[in-house]
Image (tube, rainbow, N blue to C red):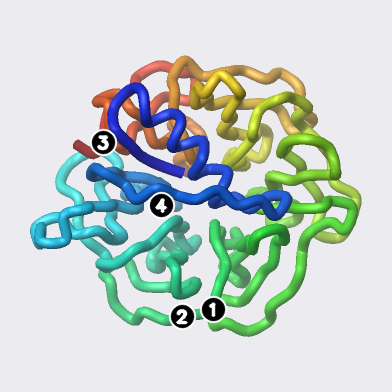
Amino acid sequence: MKLRNPSRLVPLLLVAIALALSGCGGRSVPIEPPLSVEDSAPSWSPDGQSIAYVHFNPDRSDTASPSGLYRIPAAGGAASLVIAGGPRSVDWSPDSRWLVFNDSFGMHIVTVDGESLQTIYSGGSYPNWSPDGTEIAFSTRSQVFTIHPDGTGLAARSPTSLAAAVDPDWSPDGTHMVVVGNNGSQGEEVFTFALTDTIPAQLTVDTHGDRSPAWSPAGDRILWNALPPSGLLELWVMGLDGSAKRRLPVQGLTPAWDPTGTWIVFVGFNSGFARIHVINSDGSGLRQLTH
């Protein structure tokens, strides 16, 4: 979910990339190579101090700002490279000491200082660490799995009633997940399900391509990214039963909560390019974090 050239091309290519990366329903859309520097896939550390994100730089000769996994102080400041390469998405361990990320070679964990790199699975995308630190949820093209941080204990988690389920996020108590799913109807919707139950609850029914659901730290709201036919990149919040849907007054992608539920970090295009932004959960206080 990313990119592009300022106004005209950005929304269209981002929609195409979002569809390709989700794999929901088994579809595939060719991805054009990025043309400009971009930042994507932000994730707020549980201790509230840092935001990890993916940075892409098409200029491979630029050793000052190579593509890779970065972290930046949540209050703003200089970003630091964790590990160079081609990561696609990232999440933090509950103790804020480790990062899990995926790339074209598989799924890996690494310390926030870029040390002790370990590959834990040969595939997977959208990794998400469980609140107790014992499991990492992730998705393949159409299913959700969990695995232990040491690479053992692979287990399928997708509800059998969903034809496809991707992009998982844990509830704060670790008993439920929210996913983007397809139950055989057109489009992708947001679902929640208990890990002890195979019957999901559908929270959205719309013509949007829903993406990136995130459970609030208090456990009372779901944040997600909608990609409607208009091409606008919308951020929404709703209650756990799908009620009280509210659109935030910004356009962006891949939103995530801060650990207090006060702020939301997301990929925005305020400067015309994909950069990391932060906004208050009520829609106020927009600020650009990366430049």
> Which marked residue is nearer to the observer: mark 2 or mark 1?
1
Q: Which residue is mark 1?
A: 122
| Circle 4 SS class | loop
**Circles 4 and 3 in contact, beta carbons < 8 Å:** no
Residue 143 seen in the current view: yes
Q: Which residue is mark 2?
A: 119
Residue 35 in the image, given as x and y percentages of width and height: 26, 44
| Circle 2 SS class | strand
Q: Which residue is mark 3?
A: 289
> Which marked residue is nearer to the observer: mark 2 or mark 4?
2
Q: Amino acid at mark 2?
A: Thr
**Is 201 in front, or is 16?**
16
**Circles 2 and 1 in contact, beta carbons < 8 Å:** yes
Residue occupying image coordinates x 33% and y 22%: 7
Q: Amino acid at mark 1?
A: Ser
Q: Is residue 139 above or below residue 290?
A: below
> Which badge, 2 or 4, is on the more N-terminal residue?
4
Q: Amino acid at mark 3?
A: Leu
> Which marked residue is nearer to the observer: mark 1 or mark 3?
1
